Amino acid sequence: MSSIVLFGPPGAGKGTQAERMIDATGLPQVSTGDMLRAAVKAGTQTGLEAKGFMEAGLLVPDSVIIDLIKERIQEPDAKNGVMFDGFPRTIPQAEALEQITGVTHVIAIEVPDERIVERICGRYSCGACGNVYHDTFNPVPAGGCTCGNWEEKRRADDNEETVSSRLAAYHEQTSPLADWYRSKGIFHPVNGDRAIDDITGDILNALRL
Ligand code: ADP
Ligand code: ADP
């Protein structure tokens, strides 16, 4: 079993790229953010524990995240590996991941901080299928989402106030993982400040697909 990690700041385009690579990689997208939002909506114990951290733009405690991943990786669709999106976000999470499954590639989508606010504040998605769109850079087609069931959804934490806390958390707690993975020889940076399709091409090259 071999998995891929999509790494980068909030709004870098991890989810957007994961969506486009499901067919090419044959691996499902595993987004801890999506899993946490589902848990909050369902009012589970995990959701109750995570909610306040998410609203404040802070990282949810490692133990909560690691338990979620351990459970998710048992699902039948994960038997050949997964594409992690937004996980790991701390060194303890990466250490736990080493015990759970192998990672062959860490794809780091690099986007400067000054681009992040516009990316996040213009983000919306299809409530029916999860496809991600942007007011300016990637608007939903005139006829609605490609899934055929359009329902516009915006995240409560996608606002300017929360973005600065989320970026601070990224720089303090998540970015040290870049060196950690570089030292393991599986770190592949790609320039994420370009057209969506060009970035997909670079990632597929890095994965030799
Ligand atoms: P992440 O999963 O890393 O938080 P998303 O994939 O949700 O990021 O992308 C954040 C926002 O930026 C979305 O609205 C998305 O449509 C938009 N976006 C993604 N990639 C690009 C790109 N290369 N150029 C411009 N906008 C992008
Ligand atoms: P983005 O890519 O825009 O930062 P995510 O959907 O990945 O958004 O995450 C939303 C929020 O969920 C984060 O701000 C954080 O509170 C929480 N979260 C998601 N993944 C993790 C993780 N691996 N570790 C800790 N907190 C997480």
Image (cartoon, grey):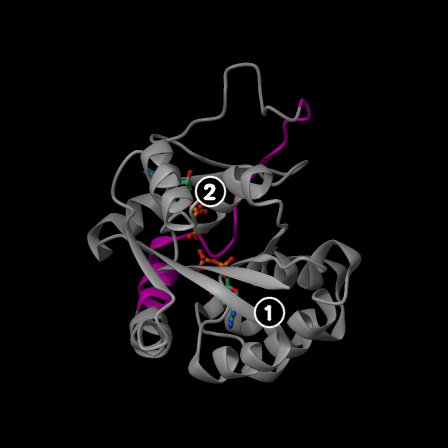
Marks 1 and 2, how far apart at CA: 38 Å
Residue at the image point whose x is 53% and y is 75% from the top: 60
Count the numbered circles shown: 2
Mark whose residue sits in front, 1 or 2: 2
Mark 2 Cα-neighbour bin, 10 Å: few <14, some 14–19, many ≥20: few
Percent across and percent down for residue 32 are: 58, 63
Q: Nearer the viewer, residue 96 or 12?
A: 96
Q: Residue furthest front?
A: 208
**Which element is circle 1 on?**
helix
**Amino acid under label 1?**
Lys
Rendering quarter of residue 108: bottom left
Q: Which residue is mark 2?
A: 209
**Amino acid under label 2?**
Leu
**Which element is circle 2 on?**
loop
Q: Which residues are magenta?
A: 148-167
Residue at the image point whose x is 37% and y is 44% from the top: 205
Percent across and percent down for residue 163 are: 35, 59
- Whether label 1 lies within 8 Å of ligand 2 gets the answer no
Q: Which residue is mark 1?
A: 51
Among numbered discs 1 and 2, the one appearing first in the sequence: 1
Find out whether residue 204 is within the magenta segment: no
> In the figure, is residue 38 to the left or right of 177?
right
Find out whether residue 161 is within the magenta segment: yes
Residue at the image point whose x is 50% and y is 15% from the top: 142
Rendering quarter of residue 97: bottom right
Percent across and percent down for residue 187 are: 35, 65
> In the figure, is residue 51 to the left or right of 16?
right
Residue at the image point whose x is 37% and y is 32% from the top: 197
Classify 175 as above or below 33. Answer: below
- Considering the image in quadrants, where does the N terminus appear? bottom right
